[in-house]
Image (cartoon, helix red, strand yellow):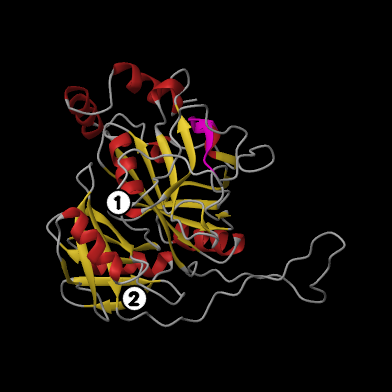
Amino acid sequence: MSLTPVARPHVTTAHQDLHSEQGALRGEHPGRSLNPVIKVADLAWLEFEKPDLDRAEVFARDFGFGVTARTRGELWLRGTFAGSPCMVIRRGRTSRFIGPVFRAAERADLERLARATGSAVRDADVPGGGQVVDLFDPSGFPVRVVWCGEELPALPEQRPLTLNFGIEQRRTNVTQRPPREPSRIQRLGHVVLETPVFARALNWYLDMLGMIVSDFLFLDGQRERGPTMAFIRCDRGSVAVDHHTLAMHLGPGTGYVHSAYQVTDLDAIAAGGEYLAERGYRRSWGIGRHIQGSQLFDYWRDPDRFMLEHFADGDLFSCDVEPGWAPMSAGGLAQWGPPATRDFLGTDPSPARLREVAQALRGDNELDPARLLALLKAMTS
């Protein structure tokens, strides 16, 4: 295992007209590990606890999930694609995010990971069965790596609309009337986490799980201190995968920021958003198109104030693309769309947020007053 990631010689080095105007400077983080323990294949599902599973199920169906299993104590949610579930919500005393679960590329990876970390392989509590290794990342998040014995079958899709483009006219004598219905979730795309130990957490995911960085963001005037956000993808060699499966950024808190779920197209995002708005749910930010990852996006709050994203048309990268580098700013989050809201950016000065800041400045982490002020400036610029 390599504790210090090093560059590989075959990665794509050109950035002009690629995905970022800037690449790494000499000596900067290369965004990958030379000899990771394993290489996970994908994000399998996310785990939450909530006290009211009935309310959680109502929102889940309105947001576009299917329900694959429901017991007195658990709610398993899925998309239309074949594979693993997207999310499990277990009954608990409070609403909280537990952690991410990644899918191993092969069963033997669990044994390899268990040997390297002194953990054990145990049976997984997942519909259809499987096995899992339980870990903790440097932020304290429970992270599980799973090998499932059975995949969920595919479900009927929400069909994309036939579009006319200039002189390319594929639809004649037919109107467009996208139905006002939930956006049908296809799959889980990514999760975003905040951590005050960003560099340690980043290296752990690269070294342990073999993930690689697509884009780094850095604070204005502090690039020499290293990145403060990373968009991280799985390494499946020549197979192109989502621009990011995991994203992390430096911050005073340790916790969930949002998770993202793929839907068919822009009309599915927009019509599904109208459906959610009519039922009284709160949009956090959208609709727009991101820069890092290029996704069309729309962000919503569930009844427990967790943020979830509908997305479509995201970038896909193979292992050959090296990280891009860009300054961190609120204005740099989207190519078009409304300005990022304070709710999305987490800049509302709530009592809980102020407590996180005070604790972080006293803790053993990567935050200091200069770093914190630069973060605040970035999120208001």
Calculate the distance from the C-alpha at mark 1 to the C-alpha at mark 2: 32 Å
**Pointer 2 local density, CA inside 10 Å: few below 14, some 14–19, many at least 20:** some
In the image, the segment drawn in magenta is 322-331
Place residue 358 in its image quadrant: top left
Give the residue at mark 2. 67
The magenta stretch spans residue 326: yes
Q: Where in the figure is residue 226, as x and y percent of width and height?
A: 40, 27
**Discs 1/2, front:** 1
Give the residue at mark 1. 208
Disc number placed over residue 177 in the picture, else none: none
From this view, report whether residue 214 is shown above or below residue 105: above
Q: Sequence order check: which comes first, mark 1 or mark 2?
A: 2
Furthest residue toward left: 93
Furthest residue toward right: 167
* Label 2 element class: strand
Q: Where in the figure is residue 1, as x and y percent of width and height?
A: 29, 48
